């Protein structure tokens, strides 16, 4: 399992891999959001309110998934920290 963290603007991002998924989990002061993709890295990105939460939406592009995650967290998308290991998520 690979773990990488980044923090900016009151939001912490943790990237890790499970047997099935690549996971980018954000936690802020008021909320959390998660972007997940299959471990092979070719499927659509799933946005969830938490790592084990129900899927809210799917996106092809990482930017669109980040926009949704930022909305859930109540911060501008450009404020979200993205660890280097997660920078290639999306199709």
Image (cartoon, rainbow, N blue to C red):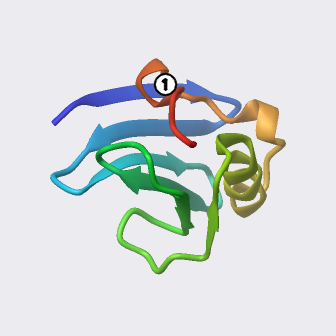
Picture layout, residue 83 above or below residue 75 = above
Q: Position of residue 27 (x, y in %)?
A: 53, 50
**Quarter occupied by the N terminus:** top left
Q: Secondary structure at mark 1?
A: loop
From the viewer's side, name the closer residue of 55 and 29. 55
Quarter of image, res 80:
top right
84 and 7: which is toward the camera: 84
Instruction: Look at the image and tell me in which quarter the C terminus lies.
Output: top right
Residue furthest to the right: 76
- Residue 36: image x %, image y %? 44, 55
Most foreground residue, 64 or 1: 64
Please determine whether, in this image, residue 48 is positioned above or below residue 85: below
- Is the residue marked by circle 1 packed among few (<14), some (14-19), or many (20+) residues within 10 Å? some
Location of residue 53 (image quadrant):
bottom left
Left or right of residue 59, residue 6 in this image? left
Q: Residue at x 61, y 29 (%)?
A: 81
Marks counted in the figure total 1
Instruction: Report the residue marked by disc 1.
Output: 83
Q: Is residue 49 left or right of residue 17?
A: right
Q: Is residue 64 above or below residue 63?
A: below
Q: Residue at x 67, y 52 (%)?
A: 65
Outermost residue toward the top in this view: 84
């Amino acid at each position: 399992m690979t773990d990488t963290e980044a923090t900016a603007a009151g939001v912490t991002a943790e990237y890790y891999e499970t047997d099935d998924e690549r996971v980018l989990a954000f936690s802020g002061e008021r909320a959390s959001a998660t972007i997940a993709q299959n471990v092979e890295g070719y499927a659509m990105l799933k946005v969830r309110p938490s790592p084990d939460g129900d899927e809210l939406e799917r996106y092809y592009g990482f930017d669109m998934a980040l926009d949704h995650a930022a909305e859930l967290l109540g911060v501008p998308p450009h404020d979200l920290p993205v660890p280097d290991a997660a920078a290639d998520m999306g199709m």
